[in-house]
Image: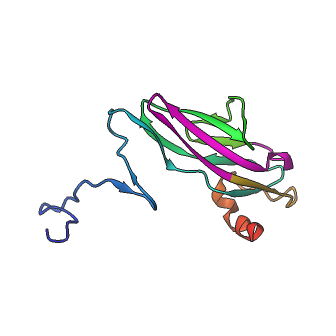
Amino acid sequence: MADGQGSSSGVPSKRPKITKDKIVPDTGSSEPTAPFFSRKLRKAAVGTSCDIRLRVSVGGFPKATLTWYHNDEPLPPSEAQDAGGLWIRDCRVSDAGLYTCMATNELGEASCSAVLAIMDLGEDYCGNGTQENYRYDLQLFMR
């Protein structure tokens, strides 16, 4: 095909995934690669007493170990941390600040950071604890 969008059989050609600022390597391979973030942390806002999950998605082989930091201080490993992110339960004003996720394997490391704002919006404000629910409030709060 002239446009390069597929083959004559109608099956799209295999292409790397493209993000806003880089090509993301295919994670289906067992070829050794340094860690990389296919989903980076995003700034977020949450009401006091609410739960929020700071989400990441990490690729690389062998599988990376994640270490979390709050205001440059390491967070102790806990059940709140998993391969998909960090849960912060019953948020308090002291939970506000800069969160960093460091992914490490024997081939290298990668990190991403974002700010979490805590807002006192009243006890009945909590949603389902994901960053997306607070996007509108964050836009208002961060102006």
Is residue 8 on the magenta stretch?
Answer: no
Question: Looking at the image, which residue is at 62% across and 55% down?
Answer: 42
Please tell me in which quadrant of the rendered image residue 88 appears: top right
- Image quarter (top left, top right, bottom left or bottom right) of the N terminus: bottom left
Residue at image position (84%, 46%) is: 94
x, y percentage for residue 112? 59, 47
Judged left or right of residue 115, residue 37 is: left
Quadrant in the rendering for residue 119: bottom right
State whether residue 127 is above or below residue 34: below
Report whether 85 appears left or right of 48: left
25 and 80: which is toward the camera: 25
Q: Main secondary structure of the magenta part?
A: strand
The scheme the figure's colours follow is rainbow
Q: Where is residue 9? Give x, y as percent.
A: 13, 60
Left or right: 131, with 90 as reference point: left
* Residue 100: in magenta span: yes
Residue at position x 74%, y 58% from top?
45
Range of the magenta residues? Answer: 89-114
Q: Residue 34, position in %: x, y?
A: 43, 37
Quadrant, the C terminus:
bottom right
At 48% from the left edge and 30% from the top edge, which residue is drawn? 105
In the rendered image, residue 47, in percent from the top left (x then y), is placed at: 80, 56
In the image, is residue 59 above or below residue 22? above
